[in-house]
Image: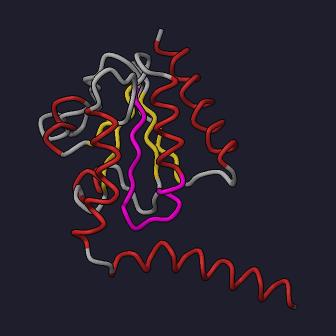
Amino acid sequence: MKKVVFILALAAITLQSCNSGQAKDKSSETSEASAPVQMVSEEKGTAGGSVLLTKEVFLNKVWDYQNSPQEWVYKGDKPALIDFYADWCGPCKIASPILEEISKEYAGDIYVYKIDTEKERELASVFGVSSIPAFLYIPQNGKPVMMSGIARSKEDTKKMFKDNISKYLLTSN
């Protein structure tokens, strides 16, 4: 009985941590969470780094769903990984540095993008994102695949990304 209560309490705390951040002041969260993403992508001489996508950039670099809503037409010249996240999401904060490592390790081979679901609600709804973190793996040719959640450890999460990225690198050549 104690184990059941402990597991339920742990689950409640985990869920609460992802939901409690929604009530925080958005201005302080935005500068805190988006700054590292922008710094990495703007640093000169740094290979890799994720790029924060707005709707306008997404339409130009990934898929113009407004002009071709029924047909997926990827505009990129190499595979991509898109991280749908929110600043208040605990699991998203765990995945973020892992994605930065992946983006640097595969620099030149893939694009790693991030979409803030709080700011870009339309983009999240286009892909039916209902829980975060969610990751969209985009091969050079073919349809994208959406996956949600992260693995239990940093190593497991990194392996999940590498396995999926490697699969798309192999199919894109």
Q: Position of residue 93 (x, y in %)?
A: 48, 57
Instruction: Identify the residue shown where x is 34% and y is 57%.
Output: 33
- Which of these two is toward me, 62 or 96? 96
**Quick check: 168 left or right of 5?**
left
Q: Is residue 138 magenta?
A: no
Q: Position of residue 25 (x, y in %)?
A: 26, 77
Instruction: Identify the residue shown where x is 57% and y is 36%.
Output: 161
- Which of these two is toward me, 110 or 76? 110
> Is the residue 14 above or below the residue 173 in the image?
below
**Quick check: 68 left or right of 105?**
left
Image quarter of the N terminus: bottom right
**Quick check: 94 left or right of 44?**
right
Instruction: Specify start and end residues of the magenta stretch as a single range.
Output: 80-94
Instruction: Identify the residue shown where x is 26% and y is 69%.
Output: 28
User: In the picture, residue 132 is in which quadrant?
Assistant: bottom left
> Is the residue 72 above or below the residue 36 in the image?
above
Residue at the top extreme, as displayed: 173
Q: Is residue 81 magenta?
A: yes
